[in-house]
Amino acid sequence: MDKTRRELYDALLAKERTQELLVNLEQKKQSAVVTADQYELLKSDYQQRMAASVAAITIIKRELKSRLRTRQEKLNVLTSELQQMRARHDAGECSMGIFQKSERRLLPELHELKRQIPFLQALVDAKSSIQVEGLKLPGAAGFPRWALIIAFSIAGVLIVATAGMAYRDWPFCQKTRRLPVPIM
């Protein structure tokens, strides 16, 4: 999905840049910096770029709408399936174990779909590259990568520090030694 987001961002950015070039070209024509032949040549080139960008945006958004529709339909099907299982359990048709098993199977998929649908809808509704650039698919709270790196680094240091020591040399394994007390 991130690849599609990037493609949409690139297409919208190309469209915006081409629009800026067209506006700049119009200003240059008004101030007589470019000739009529140059103006016509550049304008046709920019219009072709614009048409290509708009076509790419249309194709990407059509694909995104299809994905969104598919996920919404799947969400509706899974929600109704879960409601049916709940109704069967409440009616006494199936046991609590069967209901919980089906619930454990359906809930993660439901949560994933509920997480993806707003993201896809925001991509479909995006009109500029800035709107797309700020979008991130909300992720599940996972273990941060930096914490994993620190944990392995510390473990490596401890392994290296203790590897050269014999068991009897470890500080917490030594018996306390008493110094002889002088007799007076």
Image (spheres, rainbow, N blue to C red):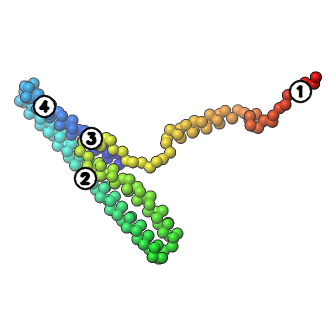
| First reached walking from the N terminus: tag 4 or tag 1 | 4
CA gap between label 3 and label 4 equals 22 Å
Residue sitting at x 28%, y 56%: 66
Residue 21 picture quarter: top left
Q: CA distance from mark 2 to mark 4?
A: 32 Å
- Tell me the tag on residue 129: 3
The residue tagged with tag 3: helix, strand or loop? helix
Mark 4 vs mark 1: give the one in front.
Answer: 1
Name the side, left or right, on which 123 lies relative to 102: left
> How far is disc 1 from disc 3 in space, using C-alphas?
82 Å
Work out how far the residue at label 2 is from the one at label 1, CA to CA, in angstroms. Answer: 90 Å
Q: Amino acid at mark 2?
A: Arg
Local crowd size for mark 1, using a 10 Å CA cut-off: few (<14), some (14–19), many (≥20) = few
Residue that badge 1 annotates: 181
Residue under pointer 4 = 25
Image coordinates of residue 73 in percent, x first then y, are 32, 62
Specify the farthest residue to the front. 184
Category of crowding for the residue at label 4, using alpha-carbon neighbours closer than 10 angstroms: few (below 14), some (14–19), many (at least 20): many
* Residue of label 2: 62
Q: Amino acid at mark 4?
A: Leu
Residue 40 percent location from the top left of the image: 8, 33
Mark 3 or 2, closer to the camera: 3
Q: Quadrant of the C terminus?
A: top right
Above or below, 147 relative to 32: below
Residue 92 visible in the picture: yes
Front residue of this view, candidates 6 and 175: 175
